[in-house]
Amino acid sequence: MTLTDATPETSAALEVLHRVFGYDSFRGEQQQIIEHVAGGGDALVLMPTGGGKSLCYQIPALVRRGTGVVVSPLIALMQDQVDALTALGVRAGFLNSTQGIDERRTVEQLFLAGELDLLYLAPERLRTEGTQRLLDQGEVSLFAIDEAHCVAQWGHDFRPDYLALSMLHERWPDVPRIALTATATPATHAEIAGRLGLEDARHFVASFDRPNIQYRIAGKNNPLKQLLDLIRTEHEGDAGVVYCLSRSSVEKTAAFLVEHGIDAVAYHAGMDAATRAANQSRFLREEGVVVVATIAFGMGIDKPDVRFVAHLDLPKSLEGYYQETGRAGRDGEPATAWLAYGLQDVVQQRKMIEGSEGSDAHRRSLTAHLDAMLALCETVDCRRVRLLAYFGQESGPCGNCDTCLTPAESWDGTVAAQKLLSTVWRLARERRQKFGAGQIIDILQGKKTAKVIQFDHDQLSVFGVGADLGTAEWRGVVRQLLALGLLAVEGEYGTLVLTEASGEVLGGRRTVLLRKEKAPTGGQTRKESGSRGGKGARVPVDLPAAAVPVFEALRAWRAATAREQGVPAYVVFHDATLREIATRLPTTTAELGTVGGVGEAKLAKYAEGILATLSTTAPAAAEPSPPAPTARPPHADEPPLDEEPPFDPEENDPPWDDWE
Ligand code: ADP
Ligand code: ZN
């Protein structure tokens, strides 16, 4: 963009970007979106987490006359959002049920007096006549509908109150609307546009790639120990999220991590509200806290420095997986998405679908979602290519996922599949029996276990025909056949049964290509690694050694400042900003003002503290950086852990439980 073709919107937007946010330039399509909305147009924005959606409505709200009204489903986070804006010198407020009447009045008065740039509201509040009258009396510059996928009825986060937002256009036809979401399958996209009456709006669809996230899916055999390895070898002292399916495994996993010296807290909808809020607040405000949670946790959490997201259980859909993993690395720094996946996951999920209530169509939809997730787990190709293809985007091998870094091998598993399927078939036909994977594998391997002898299974003609493969390999065969729909599970005990497609394999009409099983890993894939100390001492990968002590001193200053002001550390400054300061060592306020992320308000507030910190530490920058820690020995002395935690669908958390 040259100066000559700058519209008034462009120059005003750029000025706000520099002065208020302290950033040099717009990212991706931010500029087009901001100009369009600032000029009065409607927009529908699909952008991945961390893409920079907030600026797309915050800057137009600052450029236009009046107050930008932001509709957001999570009232628990409004305070943090407003705090972050206040730190930037933006006049922001919120109205929700957590406030007393006096506090609410104060915010309403500010709005009516035209003294708010941004006002956050929950959708249920916007529906009330009182709120609508209030908005009529003041001046609204735009409506921003955040987490717009909540309007999608078949999506995973449906919120009935969002349906009423179609009235915005009727009641305030001249106020521009911008709807934003990070969930973007073509079906959700169309549903949002339809329900919010945004067909005629301009649609901005960003690339969904998150190149800084390394996707890894590991074979599951001892998930807790694998998780601990991942944290100790790659993410010591980092903030992270660990997702589990059930409340009891959340509790158990958090307790296990704490026992092993990791600063972990639990979060699920069954906990009392105060403990849950305290745990969330620790995760947001302190550095290096790991939260172990059900999927009730996470929507709207915009902590930028989450360095890893781990799944100990298989997500039910790629949409869910992508949204959950997307909470890692919003700041653009390297982050890990790690999933442990095993036979038991497939059995569990297939069983749950089979036993689920509702129509056949509903079950078919659940199955289709699970199949897409399983295909990602079993692929021998680049994980990212698969993921992006699901969201309608073509790409090439990424070089930053496990299959790109250590290519997976495949093998012709047709004969193995035939052996396994014919064992299931013989048991059903000759004995009228059904068994789970364990017994079938014992028969194939020719093991004379008590249960094999009890049922005379050593008399079957298939007994011992699969002695050439190990147990892990056979479990891999079962898992992949289940994933491919060539085998099915049935009933409470998850017994194996044939499907229609099994016949094609048994009849030799279909070959089966399988993924070779790898030794299960926790954290061993990432190649590069910064020098890392103990808890809280994580150092960004690309920081020069001389800058490390300065960076640490700045972090200590930031922690003290954040504590004093009662805000999360990242509200003061992001890591990227501290890193730039530690490398450039500005000596004057003016110089400090040119660092990315240092806007006018923060410069006024923090210049003194930063420059003082630099003057005491910068000369010592010649000190050697702390030595890289040696990897800890494997935990050979620890008792073996349960293989895969038992699953209780009763205590599954729906994602919406947490909403008020
Ligand atoms: P989203 O809501 O899409 O997940 P955010 O709006 O929270 O993303 O932005 C993600 C991060 O990127 C934030 O830390 C934000 O400050 C930063 N950011 C956004 N736009 C820019 C920009 N133009 N230049 C530098 N940093 C940016
Ligand atoms: Zn890849």
Image (spheres, rainbow, N blue to C red):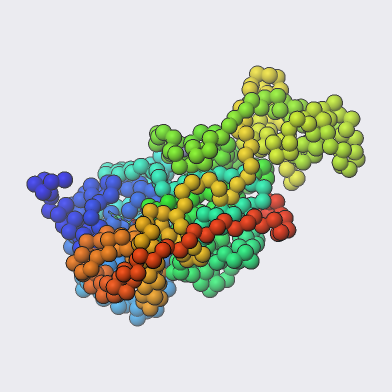
Q: Residue at x 56, y 44 (%)?
A: 217
Q: Left or right: 494 with respect to 567?
A: right
In the depicted structure, whether residue 361 falls above or below residue 44:
above
Q: Residue at x 70, y 19 (%)?
A: 507
On the image, the x and y values in percent for residue 483 come to: 62, 36
Q: Is residue 146 above or below residue 2?
A: below
- In which quadrant of this rendering is ligand 1 seen? bottom left
Quarter of the image with the N terminus in it: top left
**Based on the displayed image, in which of its 4 quarters is residue 538 positioned?**
bottom left
Q: Nearer the viewer, residue 157 or 605?
A: 605
Compare residues 405 and 564 and report the one nearer the observer. Answer: 405
Instruction: Residue at the far bottom: name it.
Output: 102
Quadrant of res 143: bottom left
Which residue is pictured at 80% across the width and 28% down the height? 465
- Count of numbered tags: 0
Position in image of residue 376 (x %, y %): 53, 38
Q: Is residue 628 visible?
A: yes
399 with respect to 344 (left or right) = left
In the image, residue 424 lies at what x, y percent? 77, 31
List x then y, in percent, for residue 8.
12, 53
